Image: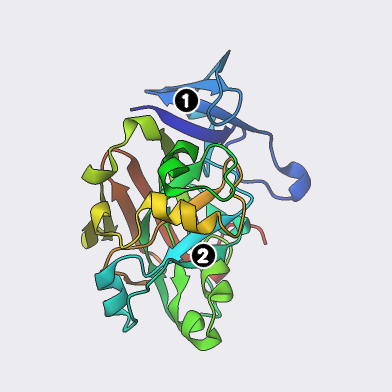
Amino acid sequence: MTKLIRFTLNRRLPSTAADTPETFYGILEGETVFETAGLNGTRNGREHSIEGIRLLPPCAPTKIVCVGRNYVEHAKELGNEVPSEPLIFLKPPSSMLAAGEQVVYPGLSQRVDFEGELGVVIGTRARRVRREEAMSHVLGYTVVNDVTARDLQKKDGQWTRGKGFDTFCPVGPWVVPATEVNLATLRVTTRLNGEVKQDGPITDMIFPVADIIEYVTQFLTLEPGDLIATGTPPGVGPMQPGAVVEVEINGIGLLRNTVVAESESNRTA
C-alpha cells in the first residue's frame, strides 16, 4: 500500500506563525520517507527517517466539502429525513488536525461527537464534471473524523460553528492512491476508548463518490488537494476530554486522536 504523506522536519508544534516550519510531501515506506515534488509527485532523491519528521494532515485543501446524512441509518438516528440529493456543507481548512494530535473540546459546547468518514482527495481541477468522468479527478482516499459540537449545531440551525472549531477535522494519517483502493470493500470503523461505536460499509452510502463529485462541481470548482468528507455511518456519539478516538478504514489506515479540554490544550490559539 502506497502511503502519500505531508510532513515537516520540525517535530515540535510551532509557537508562533513565524515559527511555522516548511512543509514537504513524501511517500512513507516502512521507517523511511522518500520526499516527493507535491502530494502525487515524483521522488526527488531526498530521504528522511520517520523519527525525524512530524506528520501533518496529508493534503492542504482550499476547501473541505462535507456530505451530511449520507447513510440512511445515520439520518434516522438523528431524527432527520433521508435527503433526496446530497446535503452539502463546508468545514474550514483551519479545522484540520493531523493524526496523533489533540482534538480540543471547546468550553462553548456541552456535547462533542465523533463522526468517522471516508475522505476523498482531489487530484485534478474539477468543474461541471459528469458522473462518468468524476473518478478520474480523484487522487486518493484518507480517513476523516468530522468532529461536531452537536448542541451548537442544533442551536444555530446551521452547521458552521458546530462543525468549524479548530481541531474539528482530524485527517490522515496518509492518502492511499485511488488506483490501489477498491471502494466496494471498505468499511468505516470508529472506536471510542477501544469500544467499537461505528462499523459500516462504504457501499451503504446513499450518494456514492462519483455522484457527490458530479453534484458538487455543478456549483463550485474542486481544486487539487481539496478534501471531500463523504458522510458517516450510524453510531455517532459523544466523547469527553481524556478519550481516545480511532477511525479506521480497512485498506487505507487508522486515524487516532486524543481529546483534551480547552483549558488543558497545548495548542496555540
Residue 131 image position (x, y, % from top left): 43, 48
* Residue sitting at the far bottom: 155
**Amino acid, disc 1:** Ile
Q: Which residue is mark 2?
A: 104
Dot label at residue 63: none
Q: Is residue 254 left or right of residue 197?
A: right
SS of the residue under disc 1: strand
Q: Which residue is mark 1?
A: 27
Residue 253 image position (x, y, % from top left): 33, 41
Quarter-wise, where is residue 250 in the image?
top left
Name above or below for residue 105 compared with residue 47: below
- The mark lying in front, picked from 2 and 1, is 1
Viewer-proximal residue among 43 and 182: 182
Q: Are marks 2 and 1 in contact (CB under 8 Å)?
A: no
**Amino acid, disc 2:** Val
Quadrant (top left, top right, bottom left, bottom right) of the N terminus: top left
Residue at (56, 34) in percent of width and height: 7
